[in-house]
Image (cartoon, rainbow, N blue to C red):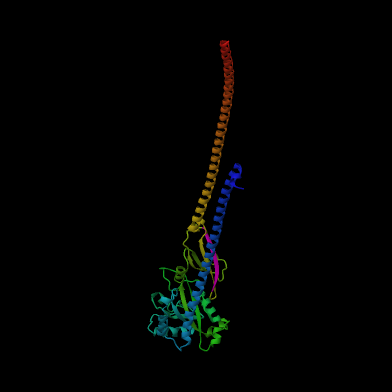
Amino acid sequence: MSMRGIKPTLFNSMIYFIFILSISLTIYAYFISIAISRAQYQSAFALQTQELATEITKKIKIYEQVLWAGVALFNSSEHVSRDEWQTFNQTLSIERHWPGIQALGYAIALQPDEVAQHEKFIRAQGFKNYHIYPKGQREQYSSIIYIEPFDWRNQRAFGYDMWSNPVRQKAMKRAIKTGKASASGSITLVQETNNDLQKGFLIYIPLYQKNISIRQYHNEVFSSEKNIEHIKGWVYAPFRINDFMTPIINHMIESIGVKLTDITHSPSTQMASDNALFNYSPWHTSTALDKQSTQLNILGRTWQLETTQPLFRPYQNLRKESFGLLSISLIIDFLLFFVLLKYRNQKNKNKELIKTHHNNLVSELRESKNANIALNQENISLNKQILVLEEWLQERELRISELKLNQQG
């Protein structure tokens, strides 16, 4: 059926139906694009969170290998001197190549009866004020004797007994039992000052006596705390968490909040609020946020990584191309509507013109018919006059003829 055969009322209904349908399809497509964009937005966010978790875990593993290199140095030598430890660290160049490590150190294990002799020995090396701190009577001692770089901040840890602190001691004991790298809980390092105070954590790798075999060393054979007599010391590294995390965040992500919490013994993040290691949020407190959360196994500890970003908002997060496509679609919808309206108006106008022309023709035909009737009547009247005239002429001729005959007679 052509449009010319459609009734006007039906055609008008079709125009508005087509317009409403096209607008509805455009709006539907817009909401579909919003749903797709929201899914992509959330998927990208989840991927960023997973990449961040992977990067943190990978960085811990890499730094663990640095500590194992230190253990290898001790196991390959009868005695590692302070100068050799310094040369080892200078070769590694941790400040340049291993950002986040505050220091690379070695702490020895000491029995109470060994403390005095040990302090005398270190003082003889030129450190006249050296002593193990904090002071006090304990069943077991440790002392940081090598720490590099030996700058002003790290010198604050020189001689510190990490075994005296419960958080550190727990990680040191776990290292002894397992023979593996062990991370501590959230803690404030002794290197910290009131300026740029940061939370931190430590990683310990045990160094056993020479009579411990390599097989024993790498297997989990140290299941009892009594095996502490096998321990010689720990190669360890303290980490300032902001220094550790900032390069990762700067390299990996943009515009998301990051929170790291140690939840090893506190599955609830609220219960573990005191164990928060790192918390970065660029958002205002009133901003509605979308959250992603995942757990990391960090050398015997469980860290919860929580990332945040603003909730998806179409007017902020849709690409300009989507708004451009929506605008073009709406313009096309309205243009189509106006074209159909113009077609309808033109059709109605043409119809009126045809009707007017028809009426004019009908009027002209009537006038012509009336003129023909009048003309016919005039013809009849004229014919009658002609007949009368003809009769008069005939009669006149007869009279003339009679007169001529009379004259002749």
Residue 181, position as x, y percentages in the image = 52, 79
- Magenta stretch, main secondary structure class: strand
Q: Is residue 248 above or below residue 333?
A: below
Q: In this view, does 250 lie to the left or right of 178?
A: left
Q: In the image, is residue 130 part of the stretch drawn in magenta?
A: no
Which residue is painted at 56% across and 30% down in the image? 368
**Residue most extreme to the front:** 409
Q: In the image, is residue 294 part of the stretch drawn in magenta?
A: yes
The quadrant holding residue 304 is bottom right
Report the magenta residues as a range: 288-297
Front one among 45 and 241 = 45
Q: Can residue 165 be seen in this view?
A: no
Which residue is painted at 50% across and 56% down in the image? 325
The quadrant holding residue 387 is top right
Residue 284, position as x, y percentages in the image = 47, 58
Residue 74, position as x, y percentages in the image = 47, 85
Quarter of the C terminus within the rendering: top right
Total marks shown come to 0
Front one among 63 and 2 = 2
Which residue is painted at 50% across and 80% down in the image? 205
Q: Can residue 82 be seen in this view?
A: yes
Residue 246, position as x, y percentages in the image = 45, 69
Q: In this view, does 359 lie above or below 239?
A: above
Which residue is painted at 51% across and 70% down in the image? 51
The quadrant holding residue 372 is top right
